[in-house]
Amino acid sequence: MRFDAFLAVLARPGLWPEALRTARDFRCKEWPKRLLWVPESEYLRWRKLTAYGDPEAGITAEDLVRYLRWRKRQRAG
């Protein structure tokens, strides 16, 4: 994750719980072996391809905040 995206979430305490849920949901299935909560690389590449049309695209801070807000609304809905 880019540092500016991290700061954008950090500046919004109301999104912290959703950010943690998202990290949990996106984590690699084998994370206990790797000791890292990182998304599956193929899944993340597919998500970026469908969102940006480029699997190597960077996720912007605005997009991350928008996505977390969307997830939060969907759960409240």
Image (cartoon, helix red, strand yellow):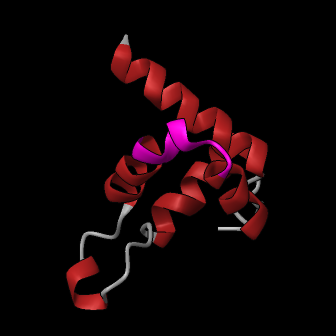
Residue at the far top in the pictured view:
77
Question: In the image shown, does 55 or 11 lie closer to the viewer?
Answer: 11
Residue sitting farthest toward the bottom: 34
Q: Is residue 31 magenta?
A: no
The quadrant in which residue 29 appears is bottom left
Q: Position of residue 41 (x, y in %)?
A: 49, 71
Predominant SS of the magenta segment: helix
State left or right for residue 4 relative to residue 11. right
Q: Answer above or below: position of 60 versus 63.
A: below
Residue 12 lies in the magenta stretch: yes
Classify 61 as above or below 6. Answer: above
Q: Quadrant of the N terminus?
A: bottom right
User: In x, y percent, where is residue 69?
Assistant: 56, 29
Q: Nearer the viewer, residue 28 or 36?
A: 36
The region drawn magenta spans 11-17
Residue 6, x across and y down, in percent = 66, 61
| Count of residue discs | 0
Instruction: Please report the residue visible at 37 percent of the width from the left and 10 percent of the height from the top.
Output: 77
Left or right of 53: which side holds 30? left
Q: Which residue is found at the position 59% from the left and 62% from the top?
A: 45
The residue under the point 40% across, 44% down is: 17
Picture residue at 35% right of the left edge, 65% below the top: 27
Instruction: Evaluate whether residue 53 shows in this view.
Output: no
Is 54 or 32 nearer to us in this picture?
32
Apparent side of residue 2 relative to residue 1 in the rendered image (left or right): right
Viewer-proximal residue, 48 or 22?
22
Image quadrant where residue 55 sits: bottom right
